[in-house]
Image (cartoon, rainbow, N blue to C red):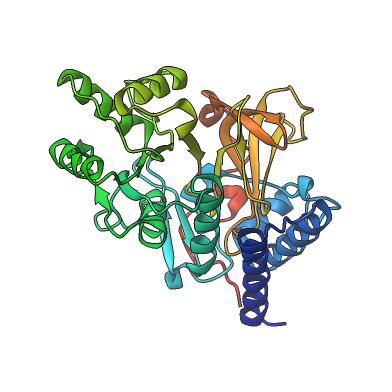
Amino acid sequence: MSYEPESRAFDQEILSVIEGWQDRGEALDDAGFNDLALRLFDFQLRTNNPYARYCAHLGVTSPPASWEHIPAVPAPAFKEAALTTFDPAKAALVFETSGTTGGVPGRHYLETSALYDAASLAGFQHFVLRDEARLRFFNLVPNPADCRHSSLGYMMGRVSACRGDGRTGWYLRGDGLLFEEFTRDVAVAIQEKKPICLATTAFALVALLDEMHRRRLAFLLPGGSRVMETGGFKGRARVIERDELYAQACEAFGIANDAILGEYGMTELTSQYYDAAPPVRHKAGPPWLRSRVAGPDRRTLPPGEAGSLIHVDLANRSSCIAIQTEDLGVECDGGFVLLGRDAEASLRGCSLDAEELGLRSTTASGAK
């Protein structure tokens, strides 16, 4: 089978998995996930040349027995090469990492927007809008009209348009908070008794709460309002512990702690994790996205041991399905508890450099 019909067939299969979970609650079981992951890996070995070279460097030239043994490309590799199964010049979406090394961002090229749209909407609906509420979205994330390469901005643009009440606000301009506009629109929502969803990075939430505190201002949001917090202190001097941040938000907006949900995503992934139900906050993902906690030898660690997080995202059909992060975690109830960033990861490296990729420029993968 040539590239185009094979890639389209995979896209349809993955979309069927997403739609089955969203519409009918059908979960991809272990055997089904393993089968699809190994077939996708075989496809990427044949069509993603930089990734194939990296796998060959590790001695892997054919699919292993289990998805847990698929070589995970380190996230910084997206700064070194176009990790695609197709010509990146034809990408439907290009997302860039916010953190840079030497001024070079990582880039995730997606051949089609269909998988990203379906995966992000289904995950958000399941974890954040389980009650199917039509909320008014207040976004303290990059506005896609200004930052078209922000995956977070794109996601919230799609969610707001498809799941909102038709009135969406964007309250970041660069690193600047549009505080007056925010307070004006919140007041309107309160007057109209319209529940809101505040989607915000941790850093933007701190800035908002600081300004509200400075002005001695608080709100009592309408019932059903909620906050989705996405992390995002990387490279920032001001950091607040999560429990303290959430306590401040509860007081400032008159909401309960369980109305705040943490989201965990990466530019290099198509899908996202969200906080699962208490008593222990941990990250859970949709059935086509799985994680494992690995040691320095990349082997899966037993529950309770901290290690590097590796994600396998079947919606990453046109890039790399397995990504090794610089984040640390512990396995928990099929998901993980996020412990923070490995401070030594960048210095130690992840056994990948330009020589192993076989190139340094963002050239086409050579897919046919």
- Residue drawn at 58 percent across, 71 percent down: 366
**Pick the front one: 186 or 114:** 186
- Quadrant of residue 235 within the rendered picture: top left
Image spot of residue 147 (x, y percent):
29, 53
Q: Is residue 16 left or right of residue 28?
A: left
- Between 9 and 1, the one lying in front of the other is 9
253 vs 158: above or below = above
Figure check: 312 above or below 102? below
Q: 307 left or right of 210? A: right
Q: Position of residue 213 (x, y in %)?
A: 22, 19
- Asked whether 317 or 364 is in front, the reply is 317
Q: Please say whether residue 87 is visible from this viewpoint.
A: yes
> Would you say residue 173 is visible in this rendering?
no
Q: Is residue 186 left or right of residue 57?
A: left
> Relative to 175, is 12 above or below?
below
**Which residue does the image show at 40% across and 49% down from the upper left?**
152
Identity of the residue furthest to the right in this view: 65
Q: Position of residue 153 (x, y in %)?
A: 35, 51
Residue at image location 68% in from the left, 23% down from the top: 306
Q: Quadrant of the N terminus?
A: bottom right
Q: Quadrant of residue 207?
A: top left
* Residue 83 x, y percent position in the rendering: 55, 58
- In percent of the image, x 71 and y 49: which residue is there? 57
In the picture, the quarter occupied by the C terminus is: bottom right
Viewer-proximal residue among 269 and 242: 242
Marker count (numbered):
0
